[in-house]
Amino acid sequence: MRAQPLGAFALPAGFMLVPEVDDPSVDETVASLLAGKLPQRWPAAMRAHEFAHGGDVEAAMAVLVADDPYTLYNRFLLGTDYVDPAHLAARLPPELAPLVDVVRYTNGDCEAPPALVAGDPVCDVVAALVLATQATEALSIGRPADAVALLHRAADRAEGDSPPLAAVLHGNAGTVGYEHGLDHDVARADLLMATRALTDTDLDVSKAELHYQLGMLEHADAVAAGASLRPAMHHYYTTLQLVTERSAPHLWASAQVNLATAYLASPMVEATDALRMGIAIQAMRAALQVFTKDEHPAQWATTTLNLANALIYTPSVKQGDNLVEAVELYEDVLAVRGRDADPLGRARVLANQGNALAHLGIFDQAKAKLYEARFLFEEHLDHDSALTVRSVLDEIAKQSVPQEGHQAAGRLAMGGVDGVRGAQAAQPKGDDRGPSSAAAV
C-alpha cells in the first residue's frame, strides 16, 4: 500500500484518500503531495482531488461516483452524503480504518478521539493523525503539556512518509507551547524546525501561521527583556509575504496589527523613525479592512484605538487633521466600550481623547473627558493613570495664563498620556483563527 498524502494540506482536500490504481501519473502526484507540493497537472484518476484542492466541493462530489471504499470515504469526508461510519471503516483497509473516526472527531460528530491499539496495522500517517486528535482532546481539558507531547509523538510517526505533515505537527506543538505559557525555548525550536521543513513546499498559509507565531513569541520575549523587536518584525513581514487579504484574511490582518504594534513600541531615535510610524498607521488602516466592527468587534476596537493613538503621536505636517481623526476614532471606540463592561478600558480611551482635544485647543470638551477618565481610574485604584490625567488637566489650566501659554503648550504636547498609550502596544495578542491544517489542534 502506498503512503497516503494526508494531513499537511487543509481540510477537506488534505484528508482525501487516493485509490489504489496502477497509474504512474498517480504515483507521481501522490509523491508530490507527500512532499507538500501541488502538481502542475492532475491525473484523470484524481480529478476529485483537483476540484477539492481548488475549493470546488460540488464538482469533486460530481466525479466521486464509484462504489469502492476509497470513493465512499471521500464522499463521507466531503460531508454531503450520509455513510454509516462503522460500515465504512469495515470496508477500508485496516491500515486506514481509524481515519473515519479521526474525521468524525475533527467534525465534532463524536466526543472522544480514536485510540491507537498496540499491534493494530495502522499506517504511520494515519497514526500521526490519531495522535493529533488525542492532542486536541488533551488541550480541550486543560492539559497543554500532554498535548505537546502527543504532537511530538505524532510528528515522529509521520516523519518517514510525510515530512511536511511532521513539520505541521511540530508547528502545532510550538504554537500550543507558546500560547499556553510553556517553555519558550522548546516552542521556538518546534516552530523554527517547522518553518525550515516547509520552506520549499506550497503550504503557504501553514508557513505564514508559523512565522506569525514566531513573531508573537519573539515579540513577547523582547518586551519582557527590553530587547529589540526586529526579530518579531521580520516574522510579521514574512507572514505578509506569504498570504494576502484574500488567501488568509484574518491571519493577514493580525500580522498587520502586530507589525504596527511592534513599530509603535520601538523607541524613536532617528529622524527616519517617523517613516516607521507612518508604516504602522498604514498597516492598521489595512487591518481594519478585515477587522470590521460588525464581524470582529474586539479586534476592531483594539486596532481602532491603536490607530488613533498613533495618529496623535506621529509627527506630521497634517497634525491637526490627524488629531481630528483621532478624536473621532476614540468616539467610535467609546460607543462600544461601556463603563460597566470595561471601566478601565473606557478610562484609557477617554484620557487619550481628552489629550487629543486639548492639543486641538478644545479645552471644555477635553476637561469633560479627562474628568470622567480620572474618576474611573480613581474608582478602580489605578492611581498612576489618575495622576497622569491630573497632570494633563494641570497643563490645560496653565493655558489660561497668557504669559505662559507658549511654554505650557509645549509641555502639553510632550506630555499627554504616554503610559496609557503604551499599554496598548506592549504585547501582541492572539486571535480567534482556527488552524489551517487538518492535522492542527
Image: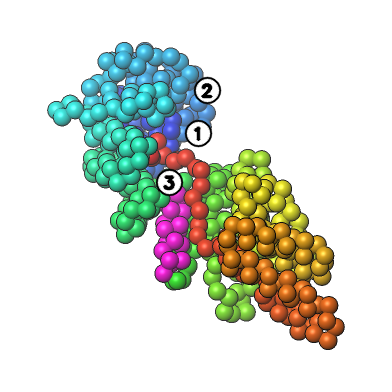
Can you identify the residue that label 1 sits on? 54
Task: Give percent across and percent down for residue 222.
Answer: 43, 66
Task: Give percent across and percent down for residue 257.
Answer: 57, 56
Q: Residue furthest left?
A: 119
**Cα–Cα span, label 2 and label 3:** 25 Å
- Residue contact between numbered discs 1 and 2, judged by CB atoms under 8 Å: no
Count every numbered label the image shows and give the total. Answer: 3
SS at circle 3: helix
Can you identify the residue that label 3 sits on? 206
Q: Quadrant of residue 385?
A: bottom right
Q: Would residue 267 appear left or right of 178 to someone viewing this image?
A: right
Residue 204: give its label: none
The amino acid pointed to by label 3 is Ser
Chosen colour scheme: rainbow
Give, as a single range, the part of the protein colored magenta. 207-225
Instruction: Assign the magenta stretch its main secondary structure.
Output: helix
Viewer-proximal residue among 220 and 100: 220
Is residue 268 among the parts visible in the rendering?
A: yes
The amino acid pointed to by label 2 is Glu
In the image, residue 178 above or below residue 260: above
x 43%, y 14%: residue: 82
Can you identify the residue that label 2 sits on? 58
- Quarter holding the N terminus is top left
Viewer-proximal residue among 411 and 200: 411
**Cα–Cα span, label 1 and label 2:** 11 Å
Say which of marks 2 and 3 sits in front.
3
Q: Earlier in the sequence, mark 2 or mark 3?
A: 2
The amino acid pointed to by label 1 is Gly
x 62%, y 60%: residue: 377
Disc 2 residue crowd, few under 14, some 14–19, many 20+, Cα 10 Å: few
**291 is within the stretch colored magenta:** no
In the image, residue 158 above or below residue 425: above
